[in-house]
Amino acid sequence: MNQAARLLEALLFVSPQPVSAAELAAAGELSEGELTAALAELASEYAPGRHGVELSAVANGYSFVVAADCEGAIRRFLGAGRPDDLSPALLETLSVVAYLQPTTRAEVAHVRGVSSEWALTALVERGLIEESGRGEGPGAPLQYRTTARFLKLFGLRDLSELPDLKEFALGADEVEAIRARLLSVAERRSN
């Protein structure tokens, strides 16, 4: 492995978060060409099936992640389930935030049809969503958005990789109900 690839390997090894290409280039004092070549070499070295960790492009950056076929052994070794096991209510709330962001507590509750205060708090505590300021006007409510940790956990480079809502296998009635609630929130925002 060449020196630039070794340097990137070390940087990614010590970082708990995904690291952007710009940050890697700056830390390693690498040109764009050197960075591209080094990342390609690392991707080849840490391709699926070669090691217990893999190089992954997530959250607008790069990170080492545990290979999928090793996750069971990791869970047994650590003596616990994944800390990010999410209940259906948390997954539903997270999905609403991901697709509507930035969004408010009231908008999430409107789409879900139930109070979502506990779920939003739990997702903030897990680092999957964060406060992203307030809407416009005096007394405007807090808004929420997903985090880089969300992207990493779900293996997404950015939000454009979220699946299209049309891909979900819901019945026509369910789709219409969700669509109506989403349109209702969108209409309220425009007023």
Image (cartoon, rainbow, N blue to C red):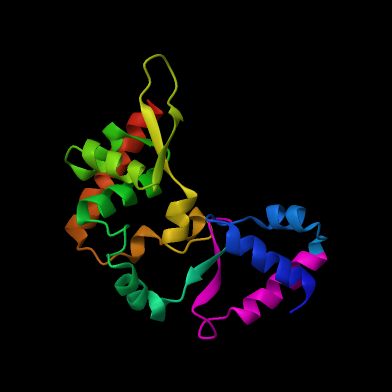
Q: Is 123 in front, or is 103? A: 123
State the residue at coordinates (32%, 45%).
Answer: 123
Q: Looking at the image, which residue is at 45% across and 22% down?
A: 136
Q: Residue furthest bottom?
A: 49
Residue 79 vertical placement versus 142 (above, below): below
Q: Position of residue 190 (x, y in %)?
A: 40, 29
**Image height check: is 180 above or below 48?**
above
Is residue 129 something one can see in this rendering?
yes
Of residues 27 and 80, which is closer to you in this image?
Answer: 80
Q: Position of residue 34 (x, y in %)?
A: 81, 67
Residue 62 pos. (x, y %): 59, 62
Residue 45 on the magenta span? yes
What count of labels does the image hold?
A: 0
Report which quarter residue 144 is drawn in. top left
Magenta includes 7? no
Q: Can residue 61 be seen from the camera position used here? A: no
Q: Quadrant of the N terminus?
A: bottom right
Q: Locate the C terminus and report the quarter of the image it occupies.
A: top left
Q: Is residue 55 left or right of residue 39?
A: left
Q: Quadrant of residue 111?
A: top left
Query: Residue 7: x percent and y percent?
Result: 72, 66
The residue at 39%/48% (across/down) is 128
User: Height in image: 61 above or below 134?
Assistant: below
- Give left or right: position of 168 versus 162: left
Question: From which residue to which does the magenta span run?
Answer: 33-62
Give 162 or 190, whichever is nearer the viewer. Answer: 162
